[in-house]
Amino acid sequence: MAFDTIIAGGTVVTASDAYVADVAVSGSKVVAIGKDLPRENAGRVFDASDKYVLPGGIDVHTHLDMPFGGTTSADDFETGTRAAAFGGTTTIIDFAIQYKGQTLRAALDSWMEKAASRAVSDYAFHCIITDLKDAHLDEMKALVREGVTTFKLFMAYPGVFMLDDASIFRALRQTAAHGGMVCMHAENGGAIDVIVRQALAEGKTAPKYHALTRPTTAEAEATARAIALAEMAGAPVYIVHLSCNDALEKVREARDRGLPVYAETCPQYLYLSLDNFDAPGFEGAKYVFTPPLREKWHQEKLWTGLKQDQLQVVSTDHCPFCFKEQKEMGRDDFTKIPNGGPGIEHRMSLIYSGGVAQKRFSVSRFVEIVSTTPAKLFGLYPRKGTVAVGSDADLVIFDPNREHTISAKTHHMRVDYSMFEGIRVKGMPEIVFSRGRVLVEKDKFMGRPGGGEYLKRSSATGLP
Ligand SMILES: [Zn+2]
């Protein structure tokens, strides 16, 4: 038997095992895994000894080419998926935003258009609902059947994205009846708005006040409310970008009661803190995103949450805005700083480095957090999220010993600063495959715009 590609002698890592084997690829799929597969007729053989062979990373929370506050996030589907590939992420789930008065279908169509000719690797969409009438409830049902199985709702940003509790409850009931899952931005937007207006009235306009006006209690309250509404509806719920211990305790409590409650955190909450706002001048604007950075002690609580499966996923909430001209829109008023930070490229290395290299959890748990559970929760498993015969050959040859200092000077994201500037990571992707094609080989990009495919998803498969 001849194979297109053999990845030879690496340590294959899945969420449950790590073992030395050859992995053979033909076309877009993994077709064999075993000891000493025949190499004679293989198109290419990659030596992976002393390296890991991982399933491609799945980042379920990105905002490419997204309009926000009078500007647009700096990476489009080409530059964003390309930067993701350099970091070992081969699948993203982005968000199609329904604006008020629009159908969900129109939202999806416009984001499909943004992605189709640009994405270098595979992609799917959640649908953000900002306006929920009866007709939209019917549309939710139709979209689930067509492979858009998750809906993001906001408990923050009143007047822009926020839905009231009744609408949220109706959406949750719809997913309970017809499948799919709600992803929740959990912050009490009403209370936060009162605090923000007071701060501005007192002349507190610097970037740090973005963080200081969004207390952890506001996130914990909304998290608890989201869980209660989901419990009443009999629906699962997924809390996005959980940032603090207060909210984590609500998730832990719900999971201890056996409720289908899931949550993700992001590298910025594991590596950065309120201390970053000590940066000189207006530089704190680089760290303005929502929920905001917290006191440093929350970081270790979140790492422990990942280890103990109170948190199931790490995504990036990648939403880059350049410091020059974009972040600067808020020089005199922190509420005018576009909310978001760049992270799509460094998720795998940051979580490997802090999680596995620093001995907080195993390499299998790492794979589970960055690839397998995202695939399972979001209806892509087992096509994505594991190394198995029949799965897509989205594979990463990962060097656990290669060290790298993160910097805007060398990153591939189209943004003029790095949130993680100067942080040294251990563990870097070396060769990255998407459906059998080499996307990145030793720091060289080999893919092409439009090479990515849209992924229709099923309702959550095998919820962990
Ligand atoms: Zn987001």
Image: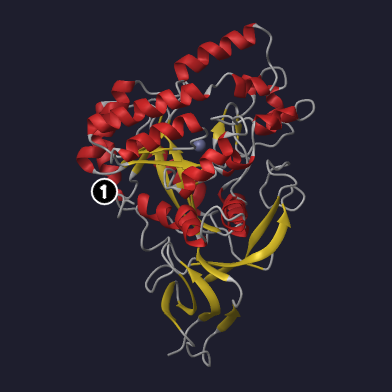
Label 1 element class: helix
Quarter placement of the N terminus: bottom left
Residue 279 in the image: state x and y as whole percent. 76, 30
Quarter of the view holding residue 326: top right
**Residue 455 visible:** no
Residue 105 in the image: state x and y as whole percent. 35, 39
Q: Which residue is mark 1?
A: 145
Residue 90 in the image: state x and y as whole percent. 52, 59
Badge 1, how many Cα within 10 Å: few under 14, some, many 20+?
Answer: some
Amino acid type of disc 1?
Arg
Quarter of the view holding residue 288: top right
Q: Nearer the viewer, residue 454 or 339?
A: 339
Residue 446 in the image: state x and y as whole percent. 63, 67
Q: Nearer the viewer, residue 459 or 398?
A: 398
Q: Nearer the viewer, residue 147 or 222?
A: 222
Q: Residue at x 26, y 32 (%)?
A: 231
Q: Is residue 117 left or right of residue 211?
A: left
Q: Is residue 404 left or right of residue 95?
A: right
Please state the total of marks drawn on the protein image.
1
138, above or below 454, in the image: above
Q: Residue at x 68, y 53 (%)?
A: 412
Q: Is residue 450 left or right of residue 133?
A: right
Q: Residue at x 42, y 57 (%)?
A: 372
Q: Residue at x 42, y 52 (%)?
A: 374
**Residue 413 visible:** yes
195, above or below 41, in the image: above
